[in-house]
Image (cartoon, helix red, strand yellow):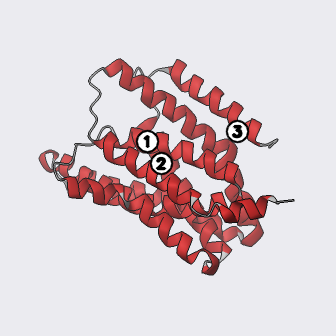
Amino acid sequence: MVDAASIVNELWFLPVMFAVVVSIVYFFSNKLKIKNKNAKNKIVSFSAGVSITYLLLEFFPRFTEGALQVHRLLFLSVLFGFTIHHLIEKEIYIHHHKHGLIKMLSLEENMFSYIYHIVVGGVFVYLTRTSIVEGFLYFITIVSYTFVSTLPTKPHQSVMKSLTLASSTIIGAVLMTIAYDYVPLWVHIFLMGLAIGVLIFTVTRHHIPFGRHGRADYFTLGLILYSALIMASWFV
């Protein structure tokens, strides 16, 4: 009888495949411009519902289990991920005039997104090696997050630049796949904490529509559907 661990080991390439799909979404969504404001609001609101549900019901609880298993200090990684993103963005707003603000924010977004997606690729490997179901849930969330995150950005004129930025998730997944057996558990948990911190900041600061913006019904729909999927995974 083949156990779950053997299946996971045989599917070592799965997180790399997940990363390839995320990179493809990253590349093409940056070049996509949705002119219909109502349609865009629906997509962003639905994605925000999916992301916040995954964070609260699956990702953070999973991180907490790992952090408590290793050391409570690992909780600082969440704070670090959230804070560093906030401080960089705040410094740009403070020290740049309006005409240079958009350019600097775009540069910051590209740099941060590149580094973040390398981390995402590494987390793909750890979660999928732990459980294919966990890896799949993370995959759905990151595809949604990546699609929405790159929609508002200005399309890159250079194909090479677009490919370079989009390849970050693949790079992270390949590097972690190669080094997986040599990476201690605390590093995996630390990377998860960083990913959570950045995701919390981005979703709450940029994705969840405030005031009259967005569609509460699509946010709720994303929340309900993904809650049902996550709760169903608890019994698999």
What residue sits 64% from the left and 60% below the top?
A: 11
Q: Are marks 1 and 3 in contact (CB under 8 Å)?
A: no
Q: In which quarter of the image is the C terminus?
A: top right
Q: Name the residue under label 3.
A: 230
Q: Which mark is residue 192?
A: none
Q: Name the residue under label 2.
A: 201
- Residue sitting nearer the eye, 79 or 227: 227
Reply above or below: 185 against 27: below
Q: Are marks 2 and 1 in contact (CB under 8 Å)?
A: yes
Q: How far apart are marks 1 and 3 (CA)?
A: 24 Å
What amino acid is labelled 2 in the image? Phe
> Toward which corner of the image does residue 113 lie, by quadrant?
bottom left
Q: How far apart are marks 2 and 3 (CA)?
A: 22 Å
What residue sits 67% from the left and 58% below the top?
A: 63
SS under mark 1: helix
Q: Which mark is residue 205?
A: 1
What amino acid is labelled 1 in the image? Arg
Q: Label 2 crowding class (10 Å Cα cut-off): few <14, some 14-19, many 20+?
A: some
Question: Can the viewer see residue 218 in this picture?
Answer: yes
Q: Which of marks 2 and 3 is nearer the N terminus?
A: 2
Q: Which residue lies furthest to the right in this view?
A: 1
What amino acid is labelled 3 in the image? Ile
> Toward which corner of the image does residue 182 lie, by quadrant?
bottom right
Q: Quadrant of the N terminus?
A: bottom right
SS under mark 2: helix
Q: Which residue lies furthest to the bottom in this view?
A: 182
Residue 70: % across, % down: 73, 72
Residue 186: % across, % down: 65, 73
Residue 150 in the figure: left or right of residue 202: left
